[in-house]
């Protein structure tokens, strides 16, 4: 894009300030800034203009969706597990590690997976995940292809770390990295921020774009060539994460559902988790702040909460359904976060509280694009130890305790 076109685009969008430091930039930096302006997606600014705060989205008719409970699963474990192990041995199952997030709440400046959760020995978050996946590999006698989504901000560090750690014993031939897209951040007035005088402040555009990014990186051919029919998507920050869990895989495949979601029974009615339910007859996830009091307290005849099952970011999607829905629009969420920026005096500011808004699509919205979803209950303390914060709820401290509870030396 040339300077005149950039000026015109920015004037139309009310973002002329992005060129304010142009004279101080080298030729290469100027060229790079013009490219960034060219790549700006104006629709995100429209999204921001119509943003009214959390819970803004209008919802359809919400109804409870039960789950395949722990008891149901125990009664069928052998049948489910055998079906899952067969699918893994036939190479039909791949796994996708979502590791493109910034992990701002943890406040660790490297990729979250590089965080050492160990106390008396080094035990990295990535290592916990690979150890869990290796258990499946050993049981099945077959490697599960693992796709790792990074972002521009952490791709190099992540790849180097896996190399340095020799993939924690995983076969590197089965590990494939791909980089997700970025989106600009805006201040409360909708002005796009600069993180350097010649660089727009961008951050990863949420975990909902993972399949599009996987395809963009050229991996659809590999999926089709290798006959990978299902992908197990999971978050980097749950150190007890069971990946390609044969029982879950088998139960989902045998259920005939379009997709599967691991869920945990709520610890209490008020717990702040997204709950798997039905929206206009299709599976959907309702956030805690979108639930009415009636929904929060409603109970089934057997006494269990009607909206009882919280998602833990572990889903099984069918590749054919994902390719069908690739062009379907996903809602863009606006989130308030801390974003470093260059201020009016040209000085870099590192805010200590949320100062800006980012744009994200979310993997949970992909669930609503499926016709049916197997809600699959897991034991919370055995499968869910999220590391979001340094201490308190969902933290390094709580995750360490849960690792120990599960007999893992830390
Ligand atoms: P979170 O919602 O916890 O976001 O991500 P985050 O960016 O990692 O952390 P905070 O909110 O800044 O503290 C849930 C999962 O989705 C991945 C994360 O890496 C994590 O596995 N994710 C999130 C992406 O892969 N890309 C994104 O753009 C956002």
Image (cartoon, helix red, strand yellow):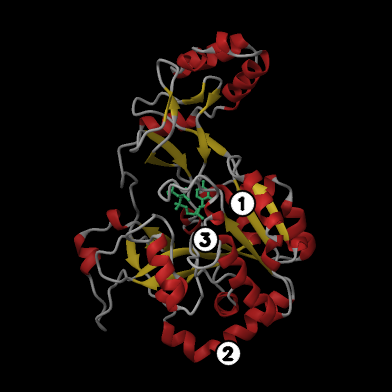
Mark in front: 1 vs 3: 1
Please report whichever mark, 1 or 3, sits nearer to the chain's N-terminal start: 1
Q: Residue furthest front?
A: 120
For this rendering, which residue is in front, 44 or 392? Answer: 392
**2 vs 3, front mark:** 2
Residue at screen point 28% across, 78% down:
304
Q: Considering only order in the chain, which callout, 3 or 2, is on the residue closer to the N terminus?
A: 2
Q: Nearer the viewer, residue 223 or 166?
A: 166
- The yes-or-no answer for disc 2 within 8 Å of ligand 1 is no
Q: Does label 2 or label 1 sit earlier along the sequence? A: 2
Give the residue pinned by disc 2.
Answer: 78
Q: Which of pointers 2 and 1 indicates the residue nearer the eye?
A: 1
Q: Secondary structure at mark 1?
A: strand
Ligand 1 within 8 Å of disc 1? The answer is: yes
Q: Which residue is mark 1?
A: 149
Question: CA gap, disc 2 to disc 1?
Answer: 32 Å
* Residue 32 percent across, percent down from the top left: 64, 22
Q: Would you identify the image quadrant in which residue 254 lies?
A: bottom right
Please report the residue visible at 50 percent of the width from the left and 44 percent of the height from the top.
Answer: 109
Dot 2: element: helix
Q: Left or right of 201: which side holds 230? A: right
Q: Label 1: few (<14), some or many (≥20) within 10 Å?
A: many
Q: Position of residue 331 (x, y in %)?
A: 45, 45
Give whichever of 258, 136 is nearer the camera: 136
Label 3 neighbour load within 10 Å: few <14, some 14-19, many 20+: some
What residue is disc 3 on? Answer: 370
């Amino acid at each position: 894009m040339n300077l005149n076109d950039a000026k015109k685009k920015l004037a139309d969008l009310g973002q002329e300030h992005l060129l304010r430091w142009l004279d101080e930039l080298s030729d290469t930096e100027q060229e790079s800034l013009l490219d960034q302006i060219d790549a700006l997606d104006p629709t995100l600014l429209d999204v921001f203009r119509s943003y009214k705060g959390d819970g803004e989205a209008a919802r359809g008719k919400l109804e409870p969706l039960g789950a395949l409970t722990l008891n149901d699963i125990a009664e069928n474990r052998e049948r489910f597990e055998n079906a899952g192990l067969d699918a893994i041995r036939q190479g039909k199952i791949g796994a996708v590690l979502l590791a493109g997030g910034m992990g701002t709440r943890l406040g660790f400046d490297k990729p979250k997976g590089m965080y050492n959760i160990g106390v008396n020995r080094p035990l990295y978050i990535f290592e916990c995940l690979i150890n869990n996946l290796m258990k499946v590999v050993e049981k099945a006698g077959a490697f599960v292809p693992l796709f790792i989504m990074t972002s521009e901000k952490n791709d190099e560090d992540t790849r180097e770390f896996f190399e340095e750690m020799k993939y924690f014993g995983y076969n590197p031939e089965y590990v494939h990295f791909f980089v997700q897209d970025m989106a600009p951040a805006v201040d409360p007035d909708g002005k796009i921020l600069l993180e350097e005088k010649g660089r727009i402040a961008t951050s990863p555009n949420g975990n909902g774009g993972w399949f599009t990014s996987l395809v963009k990186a050229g991996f659809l051919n590999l999926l089709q060539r290798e006959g990978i029919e299902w992908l197990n998507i999971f978050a980097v920050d749950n150190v007890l994460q069971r990946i390609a869990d044969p029982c879950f895989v088998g139960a989902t495949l045998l259920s005939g559902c379009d997709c599967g979601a691991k869920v945990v029974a709520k610890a209490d009615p008020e717990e702040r988790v997204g709950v798997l339910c039905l929206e206009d007859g299709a599976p959907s996830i309702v956030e805690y702040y979108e639930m009415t009091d009636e929904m929060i307290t409603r109970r089934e005849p057997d006494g269990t909460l009607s909206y009882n099952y919280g998602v833990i970011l572990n889903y099984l999607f069918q590749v054919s359904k994902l390719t069908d829905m690739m062009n379907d629009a996903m809602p863009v969420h606006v989130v308030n976060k801390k974003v470093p920026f260059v201020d009016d005096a040209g000085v870099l500011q590192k805010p200590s509280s949320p100062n800006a808004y980012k744009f994200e699509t979310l993997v949970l919205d992909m669930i609503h694009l499926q016709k049916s979803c197997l809600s699959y209950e897991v034991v919370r303390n055995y499968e869910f130890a999220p590391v979001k914060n340094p201490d308190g709820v969902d933290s390094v401290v709580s995750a360490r305790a849960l690792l120990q509870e599960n007999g893992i030396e830390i």
